[in-house]
């Protein structure tokens, strides 16, 4: 049986851990509020730009724009995998990595075996996981979430577009966690290049009825474009791609903070339960020690008598 000193030391250790997890929960809650504000501001804009591009595509020949048509002479694939830089967020990173590995195994195994699968990993966890398994990783975006900025999204988008235009790959997908609510996330595998003929809808977008709204507007409104649909697309497409990646990074950041807040809350509660058990063990051990001392005193008195 553990001694009183051992139990006291363990109680102190658990109490210190509980203070850390409680503080981390509060920090994650504050970061989550800020991240949610960014998401709620970016989602409508990113969707609206995609809606305009979908409408513009009906007025131009898709083959005239290099990012609309899929090349037949390339078999490469690029995956942009967005994870966190840190752990202690429950299954946030591991679940996303499992989705990425499943997609690779089911859809891109041939490209992987032929050395034509390229990864752009945003976040330390994904980068280190796939680097240790011998995947081709482009760039180094570890620490991106320490000071998350729009320039990071623009840089990743530029890498994906340059590889697409140079025929290193003919498909680009973005794999990330979409923020659903504080306690859950949606793992998304979203087509990025070539730009889909119909705007991709995530589960949150579908729940908000954004796709239905787009169809109604397209049926009711016919736009006049000046100086012309093709020139507007040339300006709008890079902005669209940058904001799609920016939205994915913001979604992942918000989902990460929510997952960490829940994980730290569970850890705090578990520490409280463990403290109750340890205190009970401590009281029993203390009672046993007192009882033993009383027996020894009584036995000594009897022996003297």
Image (cartoon, helix red, strand yellow):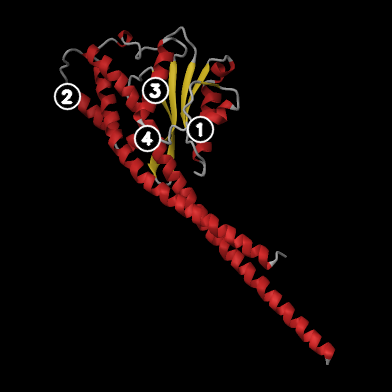
Whether residue 103 is visible here, answered yes or no, is yes
First in sequence: mark 2 or mark 4?
A: 2
The 10 Å Cα crowd at callout 3, few under 14, some 14 to 19, many 20 or more, is: some
Between circles 2 and 4, the one closer to the viewer is: 4
Q: CA distance from mark 4 to mark 3?
A: 15 Å
Q: Which residue in the structure is indicated by mark 3?
A: 155
Q: Residue 288: x, y in percent? A: 70, 75
Along the line of sight, the residue nearer the viewer: 102 or 20:
20
**Which residue is pictured at 59% across the width and 58% down the height?**
13
Q: CA distance from mark 3 to mark 2?
A: 35 Å
First in sequence: mark 4 or mark 3?
A: 3
* Element under disc 1: helix
Q: CA distance from mark 2 to mark 4?
A: 31 Å
Q: Residue 31: x, y in percent? A: 38, 44
Between circles 1 and 2, the one closer to the viewer is: 1
Along the line of sight, the residue nearer the viewer: 266 or 150:
150
Along the line of sight, the residue nearer the viewer: 86 or 247:
86
Q: Which residue in the structure is indicated by mark 2?
A: 221
**Which residue is pictured at 52% across the width and 53% down the height?**
267
First in sequence: mark 3 or mark 1?
A: 1
**Which residue is pictured at 81% across the width and 89% down the height?**
302
Marks 3 and 1 in Cβ contact (< 8 Å): no
Quarter holding the C terminus? bottom right
Q: Which residue in the structure is indicated by mark 4?
A: 250
Along the line of sight, the residue nearer the viewer: 39 or 215:
39
Image-based side of 128 in relation to 144, left or right: right
Q: CA distance from mark 1 to mark 4?
A: 16 Å
Residue 124 tag number? 1
């Amino acid at each position: 049986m553990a001694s009183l000193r051992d139990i006291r030391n363990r109680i102190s250790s658990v109490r210190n851990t509980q203070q850390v997890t409680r503080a981390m929960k509060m920090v994650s809650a504050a970061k989550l509020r800020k991240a949610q504000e960014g998401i709620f501001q970016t989602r409508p804009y990113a969707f609206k730009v995609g809606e305009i591009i979908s409408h513009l595509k009906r007025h131009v020949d898709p083959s005239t724009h290099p990012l609309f048509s899929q090349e037949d002479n390339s078999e490469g694939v690029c995956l942009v995998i967005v994870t966190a830089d840190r752990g202690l967020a429950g299954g946030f990173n591991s679940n996303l990595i499992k989705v990425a590995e499943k997609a690779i195994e089911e859809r891109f195994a041939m490209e992987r075996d032929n050395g034509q699968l390229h990864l752009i990993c945003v976040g330390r966890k994904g980068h280190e996981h796939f680097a240790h398994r011998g995947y081709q990783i482009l760039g180094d975006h570890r620490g991106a979430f320490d000071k998350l900025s729009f320039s990071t999204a623009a840089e990743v988008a530029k890498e994906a577009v340059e590889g697409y235009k140079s025929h290193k790959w003919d498909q680009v997908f973005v794999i990330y966690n979409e923020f659903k609510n504080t306690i859950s996330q949606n793992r998304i595998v979203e087509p990025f290049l070539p730009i889909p003929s119909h705007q991709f809808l995530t589960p949150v977008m579908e729940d908000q009825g954004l796709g239905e709204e787009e169809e109604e507007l397209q049926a009711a409104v016919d736009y006049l474009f000046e100086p012309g649909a093709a020139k507007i697309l040339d300006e709008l497409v890079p902005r669209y791609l940058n904001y799609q990646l920016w939205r994915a990074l913001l979604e992942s950041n918000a989902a990460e903070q929510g997952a960490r807040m829940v994980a730290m809350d569970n850890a705090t509660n578990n520490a409280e339960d463990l403290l109750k058990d340890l205190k009970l063990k401590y009281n029993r051990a203390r009672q046993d020690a007192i009882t033993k001392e009383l027996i020894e005193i009584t036995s000594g008195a009897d022996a003297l008598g």
